[in-house]
Amino acid sequence: MAKYRKKPVTIEAFRFYVENMPDWFMDAVTNNTVVLKQCDYKRYSIDEAYCEIETLEGIHRCNGGDYVIRGVKGELYPCKPDIFEMTYEKVVEE
């Protein structure tokens, strides 16, 4: 059986409910591709906050602390921190 390696691709990502939400994520909230749930920082903890992201495979839940990835075609999807850290490394811009 043949083996394949993922091509190196640069993506944008942030940790939901931990880091500031970027404009591209807020645009997705505005057009209802993302629905925020229990996301009032004064009222809900990171363990309670989540959002629902409309992906190519259907609706996926993204919990507080998970990564939200913006793919090469602008698609959004959630990723658990352990998988993200095994798969991606931070790009150092010059």
Image: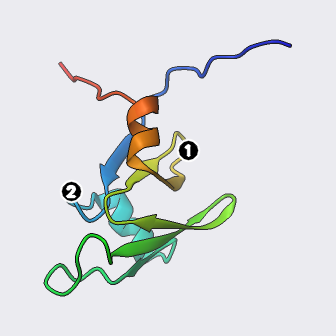
Residue on which the image places disc 1: 73
In the rendered image, residue 70, in percent from the top left (x then y), is placed at: 45, 48
Residue 45 falls in which quadrant of the image?
Answer: bottom left
Q: Position of residue 27 (x, y in %)?
A: 38, 67
Residue under the point 54% across and 52% down: 75
Give SS at disc 1: loop
The relative height of residue 27 versus residue 79 in the rendered view (above or below) is: below
Could you tell me how far apart the alpha carbons at marks 2 and 1 are, in whole angstroms? 23 Å
Q: Nearer the viewer, residue 81 or 25?
A: 81
Residue at 51% x, 49% y is 74
Q: Which residue is mark 2?
A: 19
Q: Looking at this rendering, what residue extends furthest in the bottom direction?
A: 43
What is the quadrant of residue 93 in the picture? top left
Quadrant into which the C terminus falls: top left
Q: Is residue 67 above or below residue 92?
A: below
In the rendered image, the vertical position of residue 88 relative to residue 76, given as above or below:
above
Q: Secondary structure at mark 2?
A: loop
87 or 70, nearer to the observer: 87
Q: Residue 33 in the image: x percent, y percent?
A: 52, 71
| Outermost top residue | 2
Q: Is residue 71 left or right of residue 3?
A: left
The amino acid type, in three-letter code, at marker 2 is Glu
